Image (spheres, grey):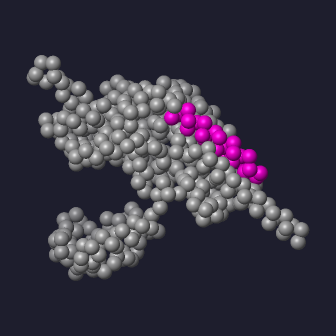
């Protein structure tokens, strides 16, 4: 785009108007606004866009051609996870969230939108029961934001800066959380041991300047933290807050973090009735106890029951509205931002349909399938598991002993319609299974990797003889 170009639909692209805006903010050029974006992430050229398409049918054909290049995990055997998961979405979930009163209701107030507010109140209540917490917010944009907000809350409550990260965190999540909190908090990584937190290493770093201890369970590799209670005791002994980032899918069978001493529990609801959708429908949750110290630091909306002027009738509306940026504007602790309210309704429908027994059975199935996959893959000569921790849904394998590379396994198996996992380094592959992964699917993956290992061994043997 040149300085003389004027977009037909955006009049502010006119050179004189652009210059007036630059003068108003004291910037010499638009480039100054992108100073924080690393040079290697900038495109440095114009977008490769097609020539303007005159007819609508031509545009539709062009877009269909782009979409046809995608392949969903319903078309291929997928063992991909790493933050977005292929769980079953009951038909009733899609049916409810496609109703017009939910699908189109981005915002709205209690006097005009009773159904949506009640649905979100029910979602909050179901999540609170699953997590053994008292208060759960309306979903934030995603789990990354929810975790960043949880840590920021801890910083405001304690007035401290240091945050000790004791789990292996998804790199993209760590990066986004750091972007969010770096002005106010310093993140320090405490290396893990055998996939989970090093409690002794944590204890040696704790002090009265620590705002929070951040635990991810399951971790990026699917490891379930076994020492939450000890971590909570150590953190609380120095006045720090325990913030636990988690996926709620396993708490029909696992002990919730709140019952092990967690002060703030946060994460993503994508696994609760939300499709993958080429990147996922994501929404973040923050859960705390019924304690004003924590509740009044939550920036996002809360919906609760309220009495009305009509005896015997109740309504649904904002709780402690005065703490939000809607009420405080620029004095707010954080901006409320975009809420993923529709996904909250979807998760609420999913939880209501599953019930306690359904969530328990699902959790047991995920644990069993994960363990079966670990055993089958570890039985391949030269393939070893990444650690000995309890895993839910995801785990890692090292294929170096089989003469393979992670990228090589992915490239070879893709030709057979299998997505075997996510390479974490040259020889480590992260493998994910869900309730949609059958025993036969796991056996097929094991056979495919086993054949690669056998071929690699044979090639090595021939080269040695030669």
Q: Could you say where residue 85 lies in the image, as x and y percent from the top left?
A: 48, 47
Is any part of residue 373 visible from this angle? yes
| Quarter of the figure with the C terminus | bottom right
* Above-or-below relation of 195 to 241: below
Q: What residue is rendered at 18% in x and 28% in y?
A: 315
Q: Residue furthest toward the right?
A: 465
Q: What type of secondary structure mainly makes up the magenta span?
A: helix
| Quarter assignment of residue 365 | top right
Q: What residue is rendered at 24% in x and 32% in y?
A: 118
Q: Which portion, as a residue range, is magenta? A: 362-387
Left or right, 267 with reference to 16: right
Q: Could you say where residue 457 lies in the image, as x and y percent from the top left?
A: 79, 61
Q: Could you say where residue 127 lies in the image, as x and y percent from the top left?
A: 38, 32
Q: What residue is rendered at 34% in x and 69% in y?
A: 63
Is any part of residue 240 visible from this angle? no
Q: Residue furthest toward the top?
A: 311
Q: Within the magenta stretch, is there residue 378? A: yes
| Quarter assignment of residue 291 | top left
Q: Residue furthest toward the left?
A: 309
Left or right, 449 with reference to 108: right
| Quarter of the figure with the N terminus | bottom left
* Above-or-below relation of 413 to 190: below
* Above-or-below relation of 448 to 363: below
Along the line of sight, the residue nearer the viewer: 278 or 148 = 278
* Above-or-below relation of 322 to 85: above
Q: Could you say where residue 225 lies in the image, as x and y percent from the top left?
A: 57, 35
Q: What residue is rendered at 22% in x and 46% in y?
A: 100
């Amino acid at each position: 785009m040149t300085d003389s170009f004027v977009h037909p639909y955006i009049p502010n692209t006119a050179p004189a108007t652009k210059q007036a805006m630059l003068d108003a903010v004291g910037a010499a050029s638009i480039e100054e606004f992108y100073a924080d974006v690393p040079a290697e992430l900038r495109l440095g050229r114009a977008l490769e866009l097609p020539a303007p398409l005159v007819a609508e049918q031509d545009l539709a054909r062009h877009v269909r051609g782009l979409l046809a290049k995608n392949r969903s995990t319903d078309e291929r055997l997928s063992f991909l996870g790493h933050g977005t998961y292929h769980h079953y979405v009951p038909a009733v979930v899609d049916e409810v969230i496609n109703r017009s009163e939910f699908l189109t209701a981005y915002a709205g107030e209690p006097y005009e939108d009773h159904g949506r507010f009640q649905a979100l109140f029910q979602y909050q209540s179901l999540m609170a029961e699953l997590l053994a917490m008292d208060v759960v917010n309306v979903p934030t944009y995603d789990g990354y934001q929810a975790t960043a907000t949880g840590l920021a809350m801890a910083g405001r409550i304690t007035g401290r800066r240091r945050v000790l990260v004791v789990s292996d965190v998804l790199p993209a999540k760590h990066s986004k959380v750091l972007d969010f909190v770096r002005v106010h908090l310093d993140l320090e990584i405490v290396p893990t041991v055998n996939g989970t937190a090093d409690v002794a290493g944590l204890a040696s770093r704790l002090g009265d300047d620590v705002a929070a201890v951040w635990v991810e369970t399951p971790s990026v590799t699917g490891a379930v933290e076994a020492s939450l209670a000890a971590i909570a005791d150590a953190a609380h002994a120095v006045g720090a807050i325990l913030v636990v980032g988690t996926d709620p899918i396993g708490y029909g069978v696992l002990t919730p973090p709140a019952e092990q001493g967690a002060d703030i529990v946060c994460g993503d609801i994508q696994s609760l009735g939300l499709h993958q959708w080429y990147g996922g429908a994501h929404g973040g949750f923050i859960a705390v106890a019924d304690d004003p110290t924590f509740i009044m630091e939550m920036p996002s909306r809360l919906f609760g029951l309220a009495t009305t002027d009509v005896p015997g009738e109740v309504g649904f509306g904002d709780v402690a509205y005065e703490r939000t940026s809607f009420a405080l504007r620029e004095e707010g602790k954080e901006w409320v931002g975009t809420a993923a309210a529709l996904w909250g309704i979807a998760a609420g429908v999913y939880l209501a349909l599953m019930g306690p027994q359904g969530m328990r059975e699902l959790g047991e199935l995920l644990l069993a399938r994960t363990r079966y996959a670990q055993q089958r893959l570890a039985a391949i000569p030269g393939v070893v598991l990444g650690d000995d921790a309890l895993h839910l849904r995801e785990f890692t394998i090292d294929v170096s002993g089989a003469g393979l590379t992670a990228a090589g396994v992915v490239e070879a198996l893709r030709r057979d319609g299998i997505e075997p996992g996510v390479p974490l380094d040259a020889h480590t592959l992260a493998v994910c299974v869900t309730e949609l992964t059958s025993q036969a699917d796991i056996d097929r993956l094991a056979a495919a990797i086993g054949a690669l290992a056998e071929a690699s061994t044979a090639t090595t043997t021939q080269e040695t003889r030669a």
